[in-house]
Image: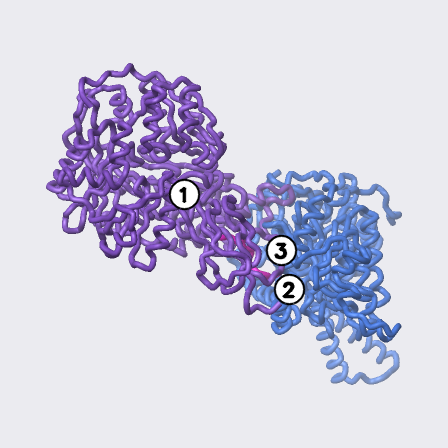
Chain colours: A blue, B purple
Amino acid sequence: MEPLRSLADTASSQYKSNYEAMSAALARLRAELKRSTEGGGAKYVERHIARGKLLPRDRIELLLDEGSYFLEIAPLAGIGMQGESPGAGVIGGIGIVCGHECLIIANEATLKGGATSEAGLWKNARLAEIARQNLLPVILCVESAGADLPVQSKIFVPGGRGFRDITRRSKARRPTIAIVFGSSTAGGAYLPGMSDYVIMVKRRAQVFLAGPPLVKMATGEVVDEESLGGAEMHSRVSGLSDYLAEDEVDAIRQAREIVSFYNFSKPATPADSTVFDEPLYAADELLGIASSDLRIPFEVRDVIARVVDGSRFSEFKPEYGPTLVCGFARIHGFPVAILGNNGVLMSESSGKGAQFIALANQQDIPLLFLQNITGFMVGKTFEEEGIIRNGAKLINAVSNSTVPAITVMIGGSYGAGNYAMCGRAYEPRFLFTWPNHRIAVMGEKQLSGVMDLIKRAAAARAREAVDEDQLNSEKAALEGQIQRESDCYFATARLWDDGIIDPRDTRTVLAISLSAVYNAPVEGTMEWGVFRH
Amino acid sequence: MGGVPALTPPMRKILIANRGEIACRIARTARRLGISCAGVYSDADRDALHVRVVDEAVWIGAAPAGESYLRIDLIIEAAKRVGADAIHPGYGFLAENAEFAEACAGASITFIGPRAETIRKMGSKASGRAVAVSCGVPVVPGYQGDDLEAGAEALGYPLMIKASAGGGGRGMRLVTEASQFAAAVASARSEAQAAFGDGSLILERAISFAHHVEVQIFSDVHGRVIHLFERDCSMQRRHQKFIEESPSPAITDVTRGHLYEAAIAIGQAAGYVNAGTVEFLIAPNGEFYFIEMNTRIQVEHPVTEMVTGLDLIEMQIRIAEGRPIDEFPLVTEPMGHAIEVRVCAEDPSCGFAPSIGRLALCELAAERVDTGVETGSVVTPYYDSMLAKLIVHRGSRAEAIAAMLECLAKARVLGVATNRAYLIHVLQSDEFTQGRASTAFLPEPREADAGRVELSARALALWVFEREMAGRNILPAVRNFRNSVWREATVRLQTGGRLIEAAVRGTVIRCDAESMVAEIDGVARTYAIAFSGAAYLISSTVGTFQFERVPRHPKPKLAGSNASASSPMPGKVLRILVAQGATVSVGTPLVVLEAMKMEQTIRSQMDGVVGAILVKEGDVVSPGQTLVQIGGSQEKS
């Protein structure tokens, strides 16, 4: 298989301006990520440390094997949202503990006492979904004041799902360890309550359904927190705690000891992930390749050449339906079936994509979508040739495919193209975003323009004069709103993705994701919905 | 003695009544001469190298020397069991024990060494001095008698206390003022008693800034006494030599001539037979004093062998057979310059405390290496701490020093701390290179250059991560990846009591289980790495450093308000100096330990009251073991 020949011209002004814009976007990303690690701020972090406690990220670091990766999921969930903090008070990701890929979730204890916000709830739900789909064991680092009470209405009812998920994982033979580092009360008490293994840290863990004030209110009983729900009580009397830890590090050590006895192993993967070639082209060049102005298309093969092993790509139907590039490649040895946009989706490219997805399913090969799509082609000719019917074939294939899919938003994501290219609603196992990404039903200019036309048409029907000033200001306001809502931070805040990544990390992030999906059997299907013709 | 001495028949089998490098050394010559040899070993030495290099070896008892290597009866018994017709005592243990020499004679076994009466006469510092005085050789003013207190008064300070029976620094103390005298006498006496079975002591005036120069002599049963030039052994720590050379850089040819004459005169006056060493102190003004005579082969004999081309062990054997010295090809001038260093298992960063453990790696190379250990050997607390002697022989002193420095730079020992870096430090000092280093020259161990330590730590951190990855079956090529921003990965390492958080930053170019080529801060170097458990040794052009990995998940420390005194090193509890309930303050002596034959006093680090005493006299303790608990007097519970 011949390696791809990159067409990117690193000397072009386009490349340079893209590179500059992407570098600035990455500087912002790093700043936002840095901010997301600051918990509740210096004061609370210092207080936490002064109490001899480990910061939640250090708890995770100590859990991980030395040298292990940690792919943090949705690190900027909640960013920019009312009453939320970047990260949404939860840290979660995939890393290696005693040779097992585990999903680790830690409460950001210095932020509102680790209380769960609405975005935090979404993030927890997403993390639980990742664990369920990929059959990953879970380690919970619990230190949470419970629900953020003022927003309880948004949390209480859906929040119950988290406890259900723990026991369903248990049934699927993927244990959950709860290490209780601090408070875990009321509803939160069911985190250890439902877990397979519970470790409580002496003099730190407090687990009860109701704290002393509520107990006194309810029954008049006067009791202190330690005897009501301390680690020693739960380890010696109630039996809720299985392991009593002397201190935090001891608790982490015990958790690792438990994992070291997990007696399941990953199903065999088709990959020899130890022998492969790095891409022939530098990942850094992705910064100049990805368009900062999404109206300017860029060659998806130039991206593929910087992501796959040896830049080798076995392209399927290269001469047919050229706006959707399809082909097989390997990433760290894992085979992938790649679908990447090279322009707007046409009838031919849709049919080609559907066929290619079926082939990947036939061979149990995971899908990788590189999404940079303005949508399906519009216009009289295209409607007549059945663009809807043909697009539906692709959506049918994406919807019913059972091999794991991973989606990377490398540019725009507009209209039904989002669906056809395995957007969030189509449940890719992982979905990551580049910082240049924009997402909406359509571009802000088109959307505000469409609305303007509709308003003018309505006014014309009503035989009313149009107030140009008002229409223009409404149009500008709407354009501004859509522009804000199309921003990748708006998307990542709402868990529309699993995180914004540095394009240069794409290959590594995909390798980690592919390795994770192979914890569950990778099995394609030959069963599809009825294909329209 | 009179008449013509009888020529004994050639030896057929020698029992080597010793251990370690000297046992191996003697076996080497015996084999070359076609004489079979047998060894002895204690419980601690069953797997020692010296047991394997002899034809057969006899178990003689428990690990403490007093129950094995110092047991005359057991050694004679062993010689009989293997049918040995001669015994070589080596140095230390029974080498200068007249009763042992007599016991050999009584069992019709040839003792390879001087006659018992000579040992008795010259082995005692007191009568040895008398012999020197009778030859007109100046002696260091001193006192021998029962009233040491009065003797000290008369001599003045500083003075040396020495074991009358001893050698090798055992029972030796430098006392600079009267207030220290009583305590020094007590501990010297007990050390002498333990080491030689004889607690008698003598006093000598301490000569400052002197050089220690000794003359090797040999005499045969026919009455011929010769000298084999001198050795300079001025580099001593705790009266243990650690660098020796021949010839001495510190004396004039005139002095040299006087020393040879004096040594031969003393040998003749003593009616000496076999190998002996006459030790002198050379004062800064060139005056010399007889100190003592050692009636055995010396640790440092190889430097003499280098500059004379002789095998002194062979000479000892042949002379014991009654052969004349004339049979050996003697040179009139020393040939070139030889230096020997003693690589010891001791920790310079910790007061040169003995270090024990398994030698995960022992790579010592030189023109000549005399050693009793190898990779895999265990260094126990029962015997002295010397691992090996490295010997080089060159045309000039400067060349010899340079050659030795290269050997030391390449030496790699993992499993115990060693004085390797300290030896380099001394060999590089101006005092030493210029030949000015006297017995007073004892530089403090140099703190390893922080930058070099740091760089080596970072290289090790890279290697540790790289190896962790190599052993992983999940994405071995994805190293320590983070998509968020948190702290840099580090490996916590400890060296010489210092904690280093070594950043995992750099590029590994090549890596295997023993070495790595890595680029750190823009410089690529090759690093050789060895490890055993949590201990790592990393060598490169920036130096060789040992690190201990700090566990990532240490066992929790159980909370308690009491402090305690613990053993800094492996050893045996000699005396417990406090009782439960006693009030102690910072510096109060609590326990005396003996480790590798040296005494060490453990003192209280705090004011308080003695709680539990967790050891008893005679207990063998390990490093870090709690000996005495001390309750804080002003601590609130």
- The x and y percentages for residue A146 are 78, 67
Q: Nearer the viewer, residue A224 or B482?
A: A224
Q: Which residue is mark 2?
A: A53
Q: Nearer the viewer, residue A179 or A397?
A: A179
Question: Which residue type does callout 3 highlight?
Answer: Pro
Question: Which residue type does callout 1 highlight?
Answer: Lys
Label tally: 3
Which image quarter is the C terminus of chain B in?
Answer: bottom right
Per the rendered image, the range of residues in magenta is B483-494
Real-space CA distance between mark 3 and mark 1, rounded to the nearest whole angstrom: 35 Å
Real-space CA distance between mark 1 and mark 2, rounded to the nearest whole angstrom: 46 Å
Depth check, mark 1 against mark 2: the one in front is 1
The residue located at (71%, 48%) in the rendering is A258
Q: Which residue is mark 1?
A: B597
Q: Which residue is mark 3?
A: B556
Q: Are marks 3 and 2 in contact (CB under 8 Å)?
A: no
> In this image, A246 relative to B437: left or right?
right
Q: Is residue B522 magenta?
A: no
- The x and y percentages for residue B201 are 31, 45
